[in-house]
Every structure is written in C-alpha cells, then in structure tokens.
Image: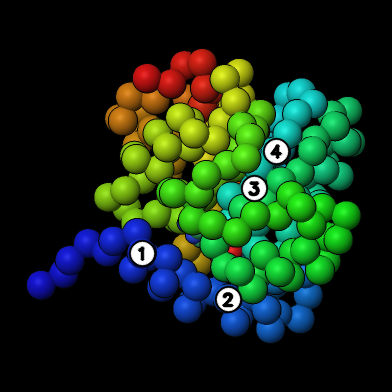
Amino acid sequence: MRTTPTQDEWNARTVALLEDAYLAAPDSRGGSGFNGDAARWQRARRVIVSAIDRDGSFLDVGCANGLLLESVVEWTAKDGYRVQPHGLELSERLAQRARQRLPHWTSRINVGDVTRWQPPQRYDFVRCEMEVAPEHQRHDLVQRCLRDLVAPDGRLILCNYGSTTEPAAPLVPSLRQWGFEVAGSAEASENGTVITRVAWIDHRTAP
Ligand SMILES: C[S@@+](CC[C@H](N)C(=O)[O-])C[C@H]1O[C@@H](n2cnc3c(N)ncnc32)[C@H](O)[C@@H]1O
C-alpha cells in the first residue's frame, strides 16, 4: 500500500537525492541542481524576476549554493531595482557551500526547513518551489509562506521547474482552486516545452 510521505520523510529523501550530487557538480549551475550552460540558466531562471517590480528584500527558499541569489541581484539591477538577497537551505552542507561562495552574504544564508523555520524578519519577495513539500502539503506550504515569511505588502513567487523531457507542472490552476488570487504568472520554454513556471500571490490578497 502506498502511503503519503511526511515532511520529515520528504526532506530526508531530498537531502539523500540532491546533496552529494550538488556538491560534486563541476560548475556553479550544477551546484544549484541545474544542467546546462550560463545562457540556458538565464533562459530558465530569469523569468523569476518578472515578479519583481520594485526594490526590496528577496528570500530564496532552497538556495542551494546561492547561484540564484547572485543572478537575481544581477538581473533585477539591469531592470533598475536593488534587491537584498537572503537564502534558506534545508541542507547544512549546501548552505555551507553557499556561504563559502558568497562570504559577503554569510549572515544571510540560513539553514532550515521552510515548513517550520522561524524567520528573523519578513521579506518583500519570497521565492519557493512547490517541490519542497509533498503534494498533499502544498496548500499548507503556500499559506505558511504567506502568513510567516512574506512582508505585509510583499509577494510570494512560486515556481515549478521541469526539463525538455519532463515539462514543468502547471501551477496557476491549483493555486486558484485553493482560493488564492494569482497576481501574475510567467513561463520559460525551450524547444517548445515549458521548463519553468512562475506564479505570484500578493500578501494583501491572501485569504
Ligand atoms: C533545485 S534547488 C533550487 C536552487 C535555486 N534556488 C534555483 O531556484 O534554481 C532546490 C533546493 O531546495 C532545497 N530544499 C528542498 N526542500 C527544502 C525545504 N523544505 N526547506 C528549505 N530548502 C529546501 C534543496 O536542498 C535544494 O538545494
């Protein structure tokens, strides 16, 4: 009989699957679980900053080696915004790698599970993949991020990632079905396949 995993089981599986592979990766993108060159990284991830429309603090939930933090700062600067980056990472060893790579941001790289971490502050923008919680817990994950992590006038940026062989799963229909007001959405494609889906919810509209 199949049982639904608890968050602890899900987290243990995540660390077992990702940690050693990310740490052994030959480049910084691989250290964030991404396969491809810098141009492909930009094609797949830059779409996230479509949700950033002003200066503010940015929390990357599941920051791995911190590459997305660096990239978001760079891409938003090109759009004319100043973002203060913060990271949260489940794996202590990956967080350590992020701190080594980004010594000027050491105090902003936190270790914890997003479903129970106590944040030292609220953030104007919080980016989180649905994948960080088991499927039956994803509604609670979205509520938890809005309630405890996002600033009162802030924005939660949700992502689903895929590949050319496994397209990114739809995001907006389940968010609407759960009663959230989706303020915007965007996607990135490669060879006609959606590889990144992004949807955002403003805190002030949270049910
Ligand atoms: C695919 S990487 C994302 C790297 C980068 N932030 C990006 O968006 O490309 C997902 C990261 O999320 C972390 N993670 C998974 N579950 C988490 C949880 N419950 N709380 C915090 N981090 C988690 C994993 O350890 C992994 O480093």
Identify which amino acid the numbered label 1 is placed on: Asp
Mark-to-mark CA distance, 4 and 2: 23 Å
Q: Which residue is mark 1?
A: 8
Query: Considering the image in quadrants, where does the C terminus appear?
Result: top left
Q: Which residue is mark 2?
A: 19
Kindly check if marks 4 and 1 are in contact, taking CB atoms under 8 A apart as contact. no
Asked whether mark 2 and ligand 1 are closer than 8 Å, the reply comes as yes
Q: Is residue 35 visible?
A: no
Kindly check if marks 4 and 3 are in contact, taking CB atoms under 8 A apart as contact. yes
Residue shown at 43% from the left, 49% from the top: 115
Q: Secondary structure at mark 3?
A: strand
Give the left or right position of residue 56, taking residue 81 as reference: left
Asked whether mark 3 and ligand 1 are closer than 8 Å, the reply comes as yes
Asked whether mark 4 and ligand 1 are closer than 8 Å, the reply comes as no
Mark-to-mark CA distance, 3 and 1: 21 Å
Q: Which residue is mark 4?
A: 58
Kindly check if marks 4 and 2 are in contact, taking CB atoms under 8 A apart as contact. no
Counting residues from the start of the chain, the first of labels 4 and 1 encountered is 1
In this rendering, the answer to whether 59 lies above or below 17 is above
Identify which amino acid the numbered label 2 is placed on: Glu
Counting residues from the start of the chain, the first of labels 1 and 2 encountered is 1
Residue shown at 76% from the left, 81% from the top: 26
Which numbered mark, 4 or 1, is in the foreground of this view?
A: 1
